[in-house]
Amino acid sequence: MTLLRVDVGTGACHVEQVDRRRFLAVEELLAVPSLPVWHADQPVVFVAGFSGRRALALDRFSLVARSPSTGGIGESRVEGPFGPALADLGRTAVSITGRAPRPSYLLLGPGSARVLDAADLWGADTTETTDRLLERHGLGAHVAAIGPAGENLVRFASVVADYSHPAARMGLGAMLGAKLLKAVVVTGGSPAEFADPAAVARITGDYQAGISANPLTLSQKADPGFGAWPASGLDGYLGVRNHSTSGVNLAGFTPEAYQARLSRSSGGCPGCPQDCLKSFDGHTLHQEAVAAFAGNLAIEDLDTVLELNAWCHRLGVDPVSLAGVLAFRCELAQEALLTGPRFGDADALTALASKIIQGDDVLAMGVARASRLLGFEPFAMHSKGIELPAFDPRGCQGLGLAYAVHPLGPRYDAVEHDIDFDPVDGFLPGEPMTALTESKVDLVADLMELWSGYDAAGLCLFAAPPTRNLDEDSAASLLAAVTGWPITPAELRSQGRRRLALMRHYNLREGLRPALDTLPRRFFTRPIDSGRHAGAVLDPEVFEAAVTRLSALLGWL
């Protein structure tokens, strides 16, 4: 397959052959000298999966660039139809450099790449931008666009593909904004045939047959889907009100309430039988948005939470980081340190969010930078500059360890959540959620390596082991059946380990030292205050030893 390089400043294009089985976008970043974040020569790389086909667990693409939030490696993985459309052009990846002389968009077609004027689109939200580009290039085109947040260089701006499939975390929308690139449009192309269609059908059928027997995959498949949260039993699992407490009220977030707003139940990822992604009121609901708005901001009305989810899609901003900066400001108001919105006050929070999107508030810089400028760093819940997901590291101590050590910072899908292994709440053998033993550290290392291999191949983690049904042998067999390459589980793991090592190397080059592999002090000093995990807290010595052990297991020491 091919790598397309495009300089949007000059319009120059160059195509080269790459070995997709070994290609990693982080190497594109390492090939460029260390430069300021907004420098025109910083690459932004769109990467299709190994196959990019419309099949089980393969409807994904990755967006990779230097993160304006951390200053280190940034990557966001996106489900939906855009990735397969990119692969239909025969592209492994598109590496974008330069800065356009005026607002522009990149049009990719079979054998062509053109930088076109987007002055009339600048300032539009992602929905309007997508509508107008589809009018221009046909309903069969696919569009990945930034909204006002990306244009205004908000450090947690997203890129939104096909209306509501966001590359949400790490601020990569701002990297396109810095290039004055409003959108990437893919049109034309033709899907490649599977190397072994019968094997693809067999593996897909086996997976589909096992969905109903697995409580996690069934919860993803059945309405209202995995983006919809249950109404109780989450104390100590979700961090609430800027992780200052654990009690959460989700009484209004019932399956029936979601069901009344369900607008799409299947087909979010063409060809995949899992159908994780559901849409509510026309917008895809991913797994973190409800936890961010209902948990971290204590907004107890489902309609408001769904409206905020849609608002984030339209404006092009990450809901997790947006909730993180707003929760920081709410806690300052709660403690009478600054005036500002209160937890649960949706109108005031939305008003402040609108200012942030326009770049008119210090919070647009992210919670780490804003807290330093304001002088309230103890209230900033972040790791490496990335706002924490709403899953509490004290109640999910293996996940919390991954937050601190993973080169991409605190991503909620760095490893499987501790709750799934918990003797009380889980359904796999394992240790309590609040344990951080050597054996749990070993499990975290194993899962980081395994899931990194799936990420490198473009395989969806929402079908991945240990809790889902696409085990390592099946995954390798599926990729081999699709591509015709003799792929093995060992190759996937090796690529995953190499990817993590190169990401770590990039971070070290850009100044992200091992001392940053930690979490806010709050998690070591303030225990969980309610539920069956009440009293749980991170032990500093145990956590430091776990960081060292995990780093050694990953080959970094």
Image (cartoon, rainbow, N blue to C red):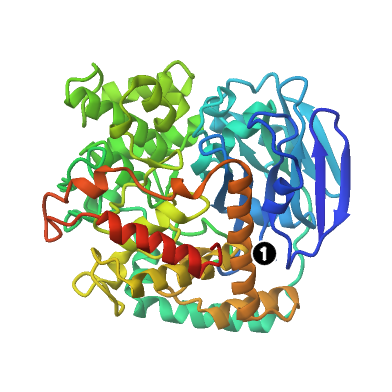
Residue at point 85% right, 29% down? 10
- Identify the residue under disc 1: 53
Q: Is residue 481 above or below residue 101?
A: below
Q: Is residue 396 above or below residue 431?
A: above
Residue 543 horizontal/vertical position (percent)? 32, 58
Residue at point 52% right, 39% down? 70
Secondary structure under badge 1? loop
Residue 354 quadrant: top left
Question: Callout 1: 10 Å neighbours few (<14), some, many (20+)?
Answer: many
The answer, for residue 91, to whether it is visible in the render is yes
Choose between 491 and 462: the one closer to the eye: 491
Q: Is residue 468 above or below residue 97?
A: below
Residue 139 horizontal/vertical position (percent)? 67, 42
Residue 123 horizontal/vertical position (percent)? 58, 20
Q: How many marks overall?
A: 1
In the picture, which quadrant includes the N terminus?
Answer: bottom right
> In this rendering, would 497 be left or right of 34?
left
Choose between 441 and 317: the one closer to the eye: 441
Residue 513 horizontal/vertical position (percent)? 52, 46
Q: What amino acid is labelled 1 in the image?
A: Arg
Residue 114 quadrant: top right
